[in-house]
Image: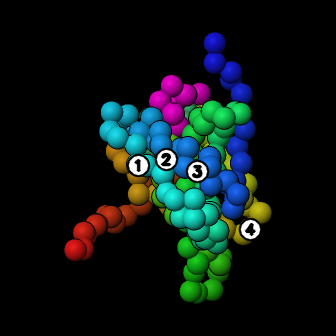
Amino acid sequence: MKPEKFFIRLLEPGDEAVLNLLAEQDNLFDQDPSVPPSGALSVDGARSFLSDPSVLFWLAELGTEIMGFLHCYIQRHRTAGPWAELLLMEMGTRVDWRRRGVGRALLAAMEDWMHGRGVREVWVPANTYATPFYEKCGFAKDEGEILVRAVG
Ligand SMILES: CC(C)(COP(=O)(O)OP(=O)(O)OC[C@H]1O[C@@H](n2cnc3c(N)ncnc32)[C@H](O)[C@@H]1OP(=O)(O)O)[C@@H](O)C(=O)NCCC(=O)NCCS
């Protein structure tokens, strides 16, 4: 029987090992778990990532078990008004933990962070599979399209 409890925390420098543990198994957090995992950074690379002031990385965990993660970027505004917005870059709940409130709890941690810092908007380039989840959690479709270009 799996425990129902998990804890959410914002990673910081010093958490390189757990960031890399996730990278070694992050296919289990993907829509298609049959893809290979992304693979870990070097310890220095992980420390550099976690030291980046624009990076926000929340983990849902219990002991050494990881249930979910949420990775956002702080995007500063160049104009008057709120100083920044968040880009929700990536999130995932481990495949055997889905539909048990992990994703919603990660978003609640993000919203607490936003409330405490005067950040009022978060946006996500969502995949089709996840759109109903985001809509359930209060996100709405916006105008425009997301384009991508590979260089090199
Ligand atoms: C999308 C994802 C993060 C949702 O995480 P989760 O932990 O299963 O979500 P929760 O259990 O917190 O669900 C919150 C609500 O959304 C609903 N929901 C979750 N996934 C859903 C889906 N695929 N379709 C419709 N509703 C969904 C839940 O039923 C729940 O509704 P309720 O609170 O009214 O009962 C998870 O399915 C996942 O990791 N998918 C693969 C990776 C992915 O697509 N990430 C997003 C990339 S943009």
Amino acid type of the residue that numbered disc 2 sits on in the rendered structure: Ala
Residue 140 is covered by the magenta coloring: no
Query: Is disc 1 placed on a helix, strand or loop?
Result: loop
In primary-sequence order, the first of circles 1 and 3 is: 3
Mark 4: give few (<14), some (14-19) or many (20+) Cα within 10 Å. Answer: few
Pointer 2 residue: 23
Amino acid type of the residue that numbered disc 3 sits on in the rendered structure: Leu
Circle number at residue 38: 1
Query: Is disc 2 placed on a helix, strand or loop?
Result: helix
Q: Quadrant of residue 110?
A: bottom right
In primary-sequence order, the first of circles 3 and 4 is: 3
Circle number at residue 19: 3
In primary-sequence order, the first of circles 1 and 4 is: 1
Circle number at residue 117: 4
From mark 1 to mark 2, how far is it between C-alphas?
6 Å
Query: Is disc 4 placed on a helix, strand or loop?
Result: helix
- Residue 38, x across and y down, in percent: 41, 48
Query: Is disc 3 placed on a helix, strand or loop?
Result: helix
Q: Are marks 1 and 2 in contact (CB under 8 Å)?
A: yes
- Residue 122, x across and y down, in percent: 56, 61
Mark 2: give few (<14), some (14-19) or many (20+) Cα within 10 Å. Answer: some
Query: Which quarter of the rendered picture does the C terminus lie within?
Result: bottom left
